[in-house]
Every structure is written in C-alpha cells, then in structure tokens.
Amino acid sequence: MCEHGRPICRLRSNPARGHRYATAVAINNDSSPQKARDRALRLLTHRPRSESELRSRLNRDFTPETVDQVLNTLRDQSLVNDAEFARLWTESRDRQRPRSATAIRRELLSHGIAPTLADDAVGAIDDEDSAYRAGAKFARRLANADHDSFRRRLWAHLQRRGYGSALTRSTVSKLWDEKQGDLDSSDSADID
C-alpha cells in the first residue's frame, strides 16, 4: 500500500488500445506466496507452461519477490521444467500439426525457452518425414485438384509450416506422383 491507503499500481500496456494508452494494475502486495502458488498450479493444470510464461502471468498480480519464491519452489518440486516443457511441446506439435524444426524452435523461443534447450528439443525432428506427413494430410483434401492447383496449394501449405523450398518441392512432387499412381491403379481396377 502506498501512503494514501491505495494499492501500489503499475502501468501495463493495453493491446486493445494499440499500446498508446496504459492501464493501471494494482499489485496485490498483501498476497501470500500460497495464493501465487495456487494460481501457478491452476495455470499448470490447463497445460504445461514454461517458466517464462508462468513468470509473466504471475507478475501481473504478485510482486517479483513472491513470483521468484514460488517459481523456485515449483522448480525444486519439478513442476516447472523448461527442458521437459520443450520436449512435450515438440512432441505434441510434431504429432498433431507437423511443422519444420525451425518453426517449432521459433515457437519454443517465443515461450521463453532458452535457445540451447530449444535446439535440444527439436534435434530429433526429421523435417523430411514431418513435411511428408503434413503434406499427405493436406493432399487428401486436394483429391480432385489439377496439377497446378495441387502444386500451388500444397506448396503454400508446407511453406506456412516452415519447410524450405527444396524440401517443399520434393514433397509436392512425391505426393503428386503418389496421387497419380493411386488414380492409375483405381482406373485399371475399374477396367477389370
């Protein structure tokens, strides 16, 4: 509390107003580390988070000293582990929405993961296999597309996922050849 009996405030930019204005946010100085820990645990129940993400969320309502204390406790209890977060994030991304190692590394860095941890986490990703899986999944939607449309749309899809031009070119070519092979085999089955 400041001398006037009001909570100490700090300014936080407001993205809804284009960062031109700032809103005053009261820092809950009388909050206990237990409240901060409860908030952190609640955030962790939704999904794993990096230490940087937790720090940024907790700093909104708690003092930096309280946040440091809580994060140290959570780190000691292995509830916050950036290396494990990076590994889980990479596995999830590679399994559900394949993208290049470079794109996943960029995501990890945006979550506050150290570059060395991000490099270790994405080291096991095979971009060629990942590009093929991402392309094959998307190519199923392009079953009736002609060659130009197939190539253009699949190319854009793979580029948005961070794959390089050479890998994209070979993946598009391979998937087009497979599509043509499937069409040829279905045509010969119709003739019999």
Image (cartoon, rainbow, N blue to C red):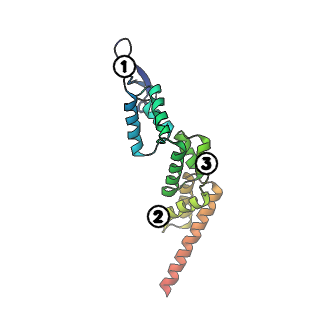
**Above or below: residue 172 compared with residue 184:** above
Give residue 141's mark: 2
Question: Distance between the Cα atoms at labels 2 and 3?
Answer: 34 Å
Gap in angstroms between the C-alphas marked 3 and 1 = 44 Å
For residue 66, side relative to residue 131 (left or right): left
Q: Classify residue 26 as left or right of residue 139.
A: left
Amino acid type at circle 1 is Pro
- Residue 99 percent coordinates (x, y): 55, 54
Depth check, mark 1 against mark 2: the one in front is: 1
Of badges 3 and 1, nearer the viewer stands 3
Specify the amino acid type for callout 2: Arg
- Which of the two discs, 2 and 3, labels the residue nearer the N terminus? 3
Give the image quarter of residue 114.
top right
**Do the CB atoms of the residues marked 3 and 1 lie less than 8 Å apart?**
no
Q: Is residue 20 visible?
A: no
Helix, strand or loop under label 2? helix
Residue type pointed to by label 3:
Asp
Mark sitting on residue 142: none
Q: Where residue 7 is drawn, which disc sits there?
A: 1
Q: Which quarter shows the N terminus?
A: top left
- Residue topped by disc 3: 120
